[in-house]
Amino acid sequence: MSHFPFQRLQADLAALISKTRPGDRLPSEPDLAKQLGVSRATLREAMRTFETQGLIHRRQGAGTFVVGKVPIMEAGLELLESIDTMADRLGLEVSVSDLHVETIPADKEHITALNVAPAAKLTRVRRVMRADGRPVAYLMDCLPEEVLKPSQLPFSFKGSVLDFLIDRGDHLTASRAAISAIDATAELAKPLEIQRGDVLLQFISQLYNAVGKVIDYSSSYFIPGYFHFHVNRRVGG
Amino acid sequence: MSHFPFQRLQADLAALISKTRPGDRLPSEPDLAKQLGVSRATLREAMRTFETQGLIHRRQGAGTFVVGKVPIMEAGLELLESIDTMADRLGLEVSVSDLHVETIPADKEHITALNVAPAAKLTRVRRVMRADGRPVAYLMDCLPEEVLKPSQLPFSFKGSVLDFLIDRGDHLTASRAAISAIDATAELAKPLEIQRGDVLLQFISQLYNAVGKVIDYSSSYFIPGYFHFHVNRRVGG
DNA sequence: CAGTGGTCTAGACCACACG
DNA sequence: GTGTGGTCTAGACCACTGA
């Protein structure tokens, strides 16, 4: 039917994006809206779908840019490995930004997930993972203070709590992760340089040591398109 | 800082929703917007986040309703089982609607995924899974015609291709699924009774038989909140 | 500083649900 | 028909970027 401008817009935008060289800037939103004959609100709604697909990147104050091919991180979910390890395996460069290491009191969620006492102190590690300079994931780990104190992290901590624990000699055995999809909150959207309401893949994990104690409760948020997570399943009886 | 109405709005809406009995209707959008002192566009953006969390349900022409507790389907990803089987295991009632069984020509995507000849004929099965009468997932299976002809499906086919194949005696062994998160397209939003742009959890799977042939290529879309998928991973060296 | 994307407003028209 | 949510418009103000 195509009664709505939105349908045509997607096709027009797709054509424009595909004939723009990666890295180049698109016309400004007011210009594009006028050029394509729609309001800016409608244009922005269409833009969001292309941003979700990782085809464009919008930066406040700077412009909208066509995104080049991005190294994709391919990972099976049978084995737990850090993003750093994953990147090494694939020969990709990743970096960390917005690293915060803090001591916080446990809230209700932490108390049940980590099985700690109320008012227990936790170490929280938050950071943004980047590939090709672009944010691709936001990671947040919470650990009891007995397991990890902020001061124990080396000066050159590069972002992977999992790798740090393994290198230290902790006997980690398994993890359990819940998988879902969420709208980005304002708090997540800002460091990831996306918009509030954009879609994110969410993993909430508990990490177990050899005696079955939960030593790490983490929330991970991945921008779709940069990661290919897959899982092999056997057929049950 | 809360300079934006949006932040206050979320709190106000949360309060309103929590003190409304499940099943009851909220005031209309124009009324609510005036009452809360924001424009309808802003109100709707906030509404979307609550819809994503499964707290409210909006029906065009009818109104916005507060959603009661929903039976949650909890499933591990180590074992492949149908949603029907999953629901049975948990003692939940699920139903199927919008069932379409068609014969379509293979496109490029199918040719590589199913390893069939160009222009091969495929059987496509699409349907909406419902729990408590509400849509919770959209499932689409594509199989080569040699594996499944539309006419082979029983008159009382209840929606699970996987269960049908197993019951028929096919020797299925494993599946490989890619996991991602996407914005709902208009085509997905309509049958799932959500809005275009709402977030969905996406599984794209290939199902293998005993000789390693791909006999089913499926795309599944889950509304977050109704399903708890989790995966247990061992820590790798 | 000028120009960008991010957010919000007020109003309009539409398709749909329900009585 | 009446009222609902779904979509779109035109315009405004803001925070941020970069020269």
Image: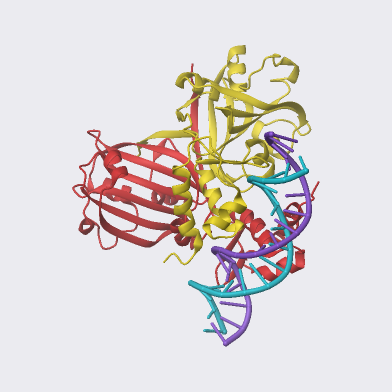
Chain colours: A yellow, B red, C cyan, D purple
Q: Foreground: A10 or A86? A: A10
Q: Residue at x 53, y 44 (%)?
A: A52
Q: Foreground: A83 or A76? A: A83
Image quarter for residue B54?
Answer: bottom right
Q: Residue at x 51, y 38 (%)?
A: B230
User: Is B48 on the left or on the right of B108, as rendered?
Assistant: right
Q: Residue at x 49, y 28 (%)?
A: B233
Residue B200 at what x, y percent from top left? 51, 49
Residue B124 in sight: yes
User: Is A201 on the left or on the right of B173, as rendered?
Assistant: right
A206 above or below B108? above
A194 above or below B62? above
Image quarter for residue B93?
Answer: bottom left
Q: Foreground: A235 or B149? A: B149
User: Which residue in the rendered view is the most extreme toward the left?
Assistant: B146
Residue A209 at what x, y percent from top left? 58, 21
C14 above or below A39? below
Residue A163 at what x, y percent from top left? 58, 18
Residue A47 at what x, y percent from top left? 55, 49
Residue B167 in sight: no
Q: Residue at x 54, y 56 (%)?
A: A35
